[in-house]
Image (spheres, rainbow, N blue to C red):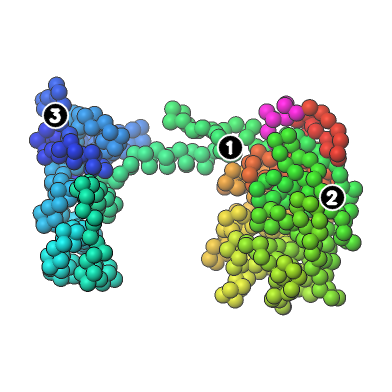
Amino acid sequence: MGGVGDNEPASKRMKLSSEELRHLSNGSTLKEPIVGSSRNLMAQPLQSEGGEEVVGSKGIIKKVEFVRIIAKALYSLGYIKSGAHLEEESGIALHSSLVNVFMKQILEGDWDGSVVTLNNIGLTDEMTLKSACFLILEQKFFEFLDEEKVMDALKTLRTEISPLCINDSRVRELSLFIVSPSRCFSIRSPKQDTSRARSRTKLLEKLQKLLPPTDIVPERRLEHLVEQALVLQRDACMFHNSLYKEMSLYADHQCARDQIPSYALQILQAHTDEIWSLQFSHNGKYLASSSNDCSTIIWEVDANGVSLKHKLSGHQKPISSVSWSPNDHQLLTCGVEEVVRRWDVSSGECLHVYKKAGLGMVSCGWSPDGKWIFSGVNDKSISMWELDGKELECWKGQRTLKISDLEITSDGKQIISICRETEILLLDREAKVERFIEEDETITSFSLSRDNRFLLVNLLNQEIHLWSIEGDPKLVSKYRGHKRTRFIIRSCFGGLEEAYIASGSEDSLVYIWHRGTGELIEALPGHSGAVNCVSWNPANPHMLASASDDRTIRIWGLNNLSAKQKDTHGNGIHRCNGST
């Protein structure tokens, strides 16, 4: 099967024409004789004591497979002579003579012959054999219709395709083409033969995916293995945090620590009290901060750094949370058990105030289409509002707490909130199904990953837990090291592909862990008070912001950027020289 036991020299196996090889996606046989080649020079594979000969220091790569995959890559790259020479010299056939006959029959439209050959290849799985026969006979059926041989097509359907007893729905579809064969008629043109050749090549590609790889080596197999190795190296690299970090085949991949934002590039000083909430916009062009001073500030992010855009006033109580609209044109702010305000980012104007008589809001969030907003209420309910303030729905009961975050998944189906001290509610508002994340310790805050697959949960016992929320919630990882005794400390996902976890801490440090390994890789000093919250720029893996009781926001970046910035003061902004 598949040529692994076919030791017949490449020069004696069936050859396809040059034109056929150009259309054959796997380019897998000898195009023409190699000048100067000699059968006497062929190296036959040797057998090791354990059976098949192996290559490589680990003794796990089978030589026959290795050579076949290299030959496949050479043909795919267009190096037809080199691929054939490798087959000739190694004595290892990419494909058996039988498989080569089969591929040639497919390209020439010899449907009956190809079915016979397919049965002789020796496939052990009956369903695979039937599925391959179905594809071949389906092509035969369509070509009969294309030639307006409706009766021949009908005979193929009745006597060859239907008896396979598979894919009944597709058989019914094919029968419709008999009723209306004009659906399949091709416009007669000089390009018709070329179009037919393309369809046969596509059929061969489908068959390659269906048949066992020992019979037909998968297309681009070597490239896939190399890419897989590079991805594994990248994922294992603790500090891989750049879209532009090139990877080379010449050496194992390893990034330096300098890819992690660990230098304070700016200190923003416009709030007059503790800063409680911090969030970059989805496009990374803005940063919103809210404070115990009852104000929210919108900061603008550009190539020159971060600058103050608007200071929003109107709340009568400290602001506990902010939420960006999906298009980043508007911002929600929530006062502590007060109201939710909706702001225009461009002008800084307050567009609407959401409130309920006798009750206070505790959290806020947007629907993914930006048409509705959600708010947690201090009677433990969650409300959904139209933008003009009309309440559309209210989920009553134990849905939220007075201190709770609120997230809505990007499909708009799930509302996530802390519903009890040790439980997080995942409410499917369409299916009306409730799921819960249950912790042993009191939950203080949480953060949802951008792909909506994970939830980062901060606990009273100075641990951060990573939960998978696909299907039944499952605890994935734990992160330790930061300090939390009295205050609400918030954490976030961040970095390239959200490969890192960042958190504030009551010891004035900013902590960064590698998400996959759980290893603590940075503890950044600089703040002079508890760091309440952090936010990683979703558009720039090299920008991290932290906010503190010391009334400042620190913008963290890479060392090589800090050297380009000069010390300046003004507009509530202090630019650092890279030191902390």
| Label 3 vs label 2, nearer the camera | 2
The residue that mark 2 highlights is 311
Could you say where residue 446 lies in the image, as x and y percent from the top left?
69, 58
| Label 1 vs label 2, nearer the camera | 2
In space, the residues marked 3 and 1 are separated at their CA atoms by 48 Å
Query: What is the crowding at mark 2: few (fewer than 14 residues within 10 Å), some, or many (at least 20)?
Result: some
In space, the residues marked 1 and 2 are separated at their CA atoms by 33 Å
Where, quadrant-wise, is the C terminus in this rendering?
A: top right
Could you say where residue 39 lies in the image, as x and y percent from the top left?
11, 27
* Circle number at residue 242: 1
State yes or no: residue 560 in magenta.
Answer: yes
User: Reading the chain from its start, which is encountered first: label 3 or label 1?
Assistant: 3
Q: 471 left or right of 160? A: right
The residue that mark 3 highlights is 33
User: Reading the chain from its start, which is encountered first: label 3 or label 2?
Assistant: 3
Q: 64 or 177, which is in the foreground?
A: 177
Could you say where residue 424 lies in the image, as x and y percent from the top left?
67, 66
Q: Residue furthest top?
A: 36
Residue 367 visible in the shown view: yes
State yes or no: residue 55 in magenta.
Answer: no
Q: 266 left or right of 93? A: right
At x 74% / y 69%, what residue is drawn? 388
Residue interval drawn in magenta: 557-565
